[in-house]
Image (cartoon, coloured by chain):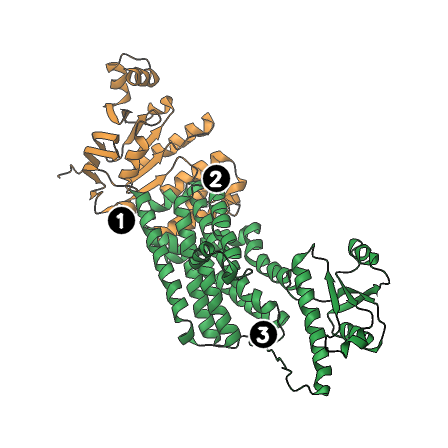
Chain colours: A orange, B green
Amino acid sequence: MTTAPEHIIEVKEMVKKFGSFVANDRLTFHVERGEIFGFLGANGAGKTTAIRILCGLSYPTSGEIMVAGHNVYNEREKIKRKIGYMSQKFSLYEDLTLSENIRLYAGIYRLGRREISSREQQLLKRLDLSHIRNKLIRDIPLGWKQKLAFSVAIFHKPAIVFLDEPTGGVDPITRRQFWEMIHDATLEGITAFVTTHYMDEAEYCDRVSIMVDGRIEALDTPASLKQQYESKNMKEVFLKLARS
Amino acid sequence: MNRFLGFVKKEFQHIFRDVRTLVILFGLPIVMIVLFGYVVTTEIRDVEVGIWDRSMDQASIRATQKIFSSGYFVPAGYLEREEEIGELFRSGRAKVVVVFEAGFQKHLQTEKGAAIKLITDASDANSAQLAQTYLQGVLMNYFQSLNQNINVPWSVNLHSRMFYNEEMKGAYMFVPGLMALILMLICALMTSVTITREKEFGTMELLLASPLKPREIILGKVTPYVLLSFVNAMTIVVLGNLVFHVPVVGSIWLLMLECMLYITLALSLGVLISTSAKTQQVAMVMSLLGLMLPTILLSGFIFPIDNMPKVLQWFSAIMPARWFIVIVKNIMLKGTGFAFIWKETLILLGMTLFFILAAVKRFKIRLQ
């Protein structure tokens, strides 16, 4: 399969079946390098299944899928080195300190000792968490944890970061700040692939795809989707699609 | 930094920062040893015995003296009427009453012989049985020694010896059993819980999406438990030796190797459990009900396998602990070498391979 160099993810006719249930029905789309790609859909629409395949956590039934220039069938190890991942559930270790969590993940991605130290300092300074670097994660507020979890997911400067409902349970202000962080990451060349429930968040994405019953029903920029479906906001677009 | 070592370090941090884990890891073996050593005992000591001597002649008085000088029994009083037996048992002041018939000495010299009646409080069947056996032993010994002087041509002198445990110490039985139990508990329970914890908290997904390979994740999680369990096994051996004088007659190296094999087996069982348990609670219940109880009941640790119904005997054959206990007893008490335990070792090895393969297969299915 040929991949345009600016396409960091290229998916053609991706199918995933569990027995007779079709979770992903011939998905075809691409993600451009450096964009924020919103991956929307109701619960059970097949978002998580798709994201797991793209991350190398499960195999597709059929289809051609390239992630960061590698095939998901036999180059999963290479893919895993180039991606970051943050799941719906909160994903830092509660009984380790901020610093220990950062160092653990940095070690897993084989960053050098000196590099880890300098990047850790920068990161903690940017998040204004330097003074509590030796606190256990369980002792800090959820919003901070979430921001830190994201920073850890992009600590090794991956080509793509997959965010699976990253803002669940977080207050609106923190959500806002969280999206600013995602935006900043894309400025550094990281592509963000985000699933979310919050339709207002869809407006922050460069392009949005909406899944219904395992299929992609719409894919475009938020502005043109609103125009196409004659809607005031993304919530209306979503409801129109989900009900049709 | 080597990413595998970093991962192992993190696992140690989990262990040493969790009080519950620490208590189970280090407190449990010591508590169990002390409990089994001092409380759950199959030996008898200071059993209260009431005496109803209806004869009060030289022979009965000598026999009574023999009973109390044996070290197992203490006097609970001398009775004069039959009704006092019931009273004594009900008040709990005695477990056994020894009744000498009237004219004891006179009958002793007749062909028919003299009679002693042993009455035990069998509301506690186990202790009653034990006390009765011990009493019989003491009395038989005494009367046999009397006979020796008479020189009856047809008498048989029965000498019994208990090989490998001359003093019939309970510790000889429970130290190997405890090793089997504690290692199973720590390895299988702790690993299944620690792996399901990663699943429950969502960190497993993250690890799987990282360049760490699944086998590195599993190995990284079990490595600390291998080390700590091994320390535990040796602690039990040392405690058993220092406190209860259970020897290690055979090779300590062989014992260590067999312990490692059993630890590996228990760990792979733990990993297998974690592949089907979704939450820590489920993993805990599966380990406790599925492993602990059968290990206690069916491994021959407490209840002899030969006395079980056939069906349970078959069940006992699939208990890893059963074979491990045989191995440990052979090495520690009999001092036998590998030649005598290769069969049991092979069985454990086979089980280990089976569990590892099953765990790997299930783990892969989960990733599909």
How far apart marks 3 and 1 lie (CA) works out to: 58 Å
Residue to which mark 2 is pinned: A128
Relative depth, front residue between B356 and B172:
B172
Kindly identify the residue that appears in the image at 41 percent across and 59 percent down. B265
Above or below, A197 against A187 in this view is above
Kindly identify the residue that appears in the image at 57 percent across and 67 percent down. B173
Relative depth, front residue between B12 and B240:
B240
Characterize the local packing of mark 1: few (<14), some (14-19) or many (20 or more) Cα atoms within 10 angstroms: some
Left/right placement of residue A238 relative to residue B330 reads left
Q: SS of the residue at dot 3?
A: loop
How far apart marks 2 and 3 lie (CA) works out to: 68 Å
Q: Quadrant of the N terminus of chain A?
A: top left
Left/right placement of residue B131 relative to residue B215 reads right
Above or below, A68 against B354 in this view is above
Residue to which mark 3 is pinned: B165
Q: Chain of mark 2?
A: A
Tell me where residue B243 appears, x and y as whole percent: 63, 70
Q: Residue furthest top?
A: A230
Kindly identify the residue that appears in the image at 85 percent across and 72 percent down. B56
